[in-house]
Amino acid sequence: MSNKQRLIILTVLAVAVAGLYLTIGLNARNWDYALSRRLPRILAIIITGAAISLSTAIFQTITHNRILTPSVMGLDSLYMLWQTVIIFFSGSSSLLVRNVNLNFIVTVLLMVGFTLLVFKTIMRREAGNVFFLLLVGLIIGTLFQSLSSFMQMIIDPNEFTILQGRMFASFNSINLNILTIAVISCGVVFLLSWRYFSVLDVLALGRDQAVNLGVAYDQLVWRLLVMVVILVSTATALVGPLTFLGLLVVNLAWQLLAAYRHRTIILGAFLLSIITLVGGQLFVEHILNFAVPISTLINLCGGIYFIRLLVKEK
């Protein structure tokens, strides 16, 4: 079976699962209300899946490692630290808590600005050493996670219940204004990154080969990292942290398609992310009755798959 046929099958599955999610349980009395709630969720799933798939594929190509995800840079931990700090010092009555639009914008700007400030300094001092960048990101992420856990332990229990709702990814309460901002920001990055898809095929050969083929390696890696940060920040601020989704869908795309062109891999990962997220949302809503958040299911499956990769690759 060719890759084109496999992509067609994945497209049909993604459309079928999305159609099932939109139409299940509809009747003449509730279709207007149900679709008004389900369509924004489907759009959020598409944006989140596209952002995480593209950012993970780019990040793994830069690092030449298929078991790493952008979360290793500490972005998820920074998101949780920021949300914890807001509620810890200002309380749930703070404007940043009540105004979800302002919270979204400030969160994305903070995550992007922090990455640009810290990592640009590191890249300058270490002459573009990506692995040193990952090491510092891992340490910073651990620090942020520890600070968040400390404040969560001593915070008021009533305030913690509000914070707990932001600790897990959710597609159930999405503000349309936030969704509009996310579509615009991710759409701009998608258009800018399209021109680099063919260059990613060269980067996958390694730094020396890419430089020999005329690629301005350091400048290109820095631009791609900025795009990765914007995509991950937007997806995390939109629905919450989804640590293992990118690892799961991108590696499955590499295995299913067995291609070297990033256009094919990214498209396959995007379709797989839609199938995973919509299927998971269906399972959470209609089988588990919202007893378990979708992020828990994805992290469970992704964690098992991650262990399998570690054992397989030794």
Image (tube, grey):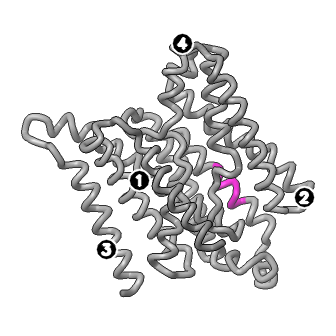
Question: What residue is pinned by disc 1?
Answer: 46
Q: Which residues are magenta?
A: 223-229
- Spatial distance from mark 3 to mark 4, Cα to Cα? 48 Å
Residue occupying the point 66% across, 31% down: 81
Magenta stretch, main secondary structure, is helix
Residue 132 place in picture, x, y as percent? 83, 57
Q: What amino acid is at disc 2?
A: Glu
Residue 253 place in picture, x, y as percent? 48, 71
Question: What residue is pinned by disc 2?
Answer: 126
Q: In the rendered view, does 276 fall on the left or right side of 141?
A: left
Q: In the rendered view, does 121 fall on the left or right side of 1?
A: right
Instruction: Point out the frontmost of discs 1 and 2.
Output: 2
Q: How many marks?
A: 4
Residue 224 highlighted magenta (yes or no):
yes
Q: What amino acid is at disc 1?
A: Ile
Q: What amino acid is at disc 4?
A: Ser
Whether label 4 touches label 1, CB < 8 Å: no
Residue 56 place in picture, x, y as percent? 59, 60
Question: What residue is pinned by disc 3?
Answer: 9
In which quadrant will I find the N terminus?
bottom left
Residue occupying the point 62% across, 42% down: 76
Residue 77 image-quadrant placement: top right
In which quadrant will I find the C terminus?
bottom right
> Mark 4 or mark 1: which comes first in sequence?
1
- Spatial distance from mark 3 to mark 2, Cα to Cα? 45 Å
Question: What residue is pinned by disc 4?
Answer: 93
Residue 51 appears in the rendering: no
Residue occupying the point 47% across, 40% down: 169
